[in-house]
Image (cartoon, helix red, strand yellow):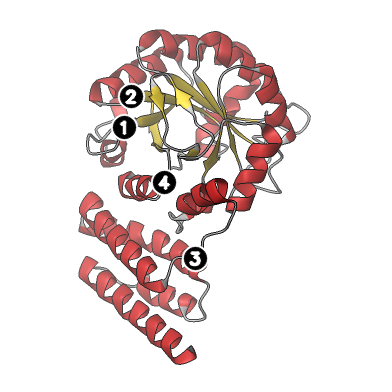
Amino acid sequence: MTSNSLKIGPYTLDSPFVLAPMAGVTDLPFRLLCREYGAGLAVSEMVTSDTRLWHTSKSKLRLPHASEAEPRMVQIAGSDPSMLAEAAQENVRLGAQIIDINMGCPAKKVCKRAAGSALLANEQLVAQILEAVVSAVAVPVTLKIRTGSNLNERNGVAIARIAEDSGIQALAVHGRTRACKFKGEAEFDTIADIVSRVDIPVMANGDIDTPQKAKAVLDYTGAAAVMIGRGAQGKPWLFREINHYLLHNELLTPPPIAEIQQVLSRHLQALHRHYGEIMGVRIARKHIGWYLHNLNTAAGESFRQGFNQLSCPSGQTDAVNRFFEQQNLSQERAA
């Protein structure tokens, strides 16, 4: 365990490094991998607050899973206080132990429903939502936000104070505004300001993709934890590397090819099991792409193109094994 710790309600995390909720990415197979590699918490994909839509296959796969390590944290999204309160209650009934409210997503399809980061422009509604959800459930409620609507309207501090007053027990802040989406670089001045103005734990989020960046952000902002999103895609061992760096002030050597092959193969099989053959094969393609990008091998792009044409689980598994056999041979020859 690092010298830092994050406490949310009755739960003290093993490490202050949290996997951010990412729609279409942080499904059960990926969350389990990241927890195995040292993430103190892995937040589920966003679940709609409209429980009438929970019968869809996508929603069913995103609802809580008893096989996960505690605490099980589920993110909900919407703009109607009563619907969000009901969704929180239903998720708790299904096994959620922490409810997270999404006010950080900048996606157009979310914001056009006045949800996600679009809510930041309406502080009165923010307060109504937070109070409704907190009063509806007995478990801790957390909130994920951005620094504001746009560069001229950074009201992150005001939202953070509303959150604290409403009974929110932890806050994650992405260092961009809604208008910035994922362009440019995340800024951490606003996050540091928020940390200094509230007493609840704050998780700093945005562009954290190396152990050095994680430490620098923790030091600069005074945050209780960092939340890691895109930096962990195709690189679940990033959490192990960050934990080691903060404990020992030294960088771990990158995982050997054999370990990456094992992780990738296990991830592939878990995706096939979780989603079934058709969806599992399709969803595996993007994850394989992220692993290959991080491997940065000359053969990676041509392999990815061929891999994306495969249509059955066994074909994908065999192709990955052949690829890594070739990588091992190349390394041996180079040595």
Asked if the residues shown at circle 2 and circle 1 are in contact, with their CB atoms under 8 angstroms apart, the answer is yes
CA separation in Å, label 2 and label 1: 8 Å
Q: Earlier in the sequence, mark 1 or mark 4?
A: 4
Instruction: Give neighbour class at mark 4: few <14, some 14-19, many 20+ (Cα, 10 Å).
Output: many
For label 4, the residue is 38
Residue found at x 46% / y 69%: 292
Residue 12 x, y percent position in the rendering: 42, 27
Instruction: Give neighbour class at mark 2: few <14, some 14-19, many 20+ (Cα, 10 Å).
Output: many
Residue found at x 54% / y 34%: 4
CA separation in Å, label 1 and label 4: 13 Å
Callout 3: SS: loop
Q: Earlier in the sequence, mark 4 or mark 2?
A: 4
Q: Residue furthest right?
A: 152
Q: Earlier in the sequence, mark 2 or mark 3?
A: 2
Task: Identify the mark at residue 70; answer none if there is no mark.
Answer: 1
Q: Is residue 272 above or below residue 311?
A: above
Instruction: Give the residue type that dot 1 points to.
Output: Glu
Callout 2: SS: loop
For label 3, the residue is 254
Instruction: Give the residue type that dot 4 points to.
Output: Gly
Task: Identify the mark at residue 97; answer none if there is no mark.
Answer: 2
Residue found at x 44% / y 92%: 333
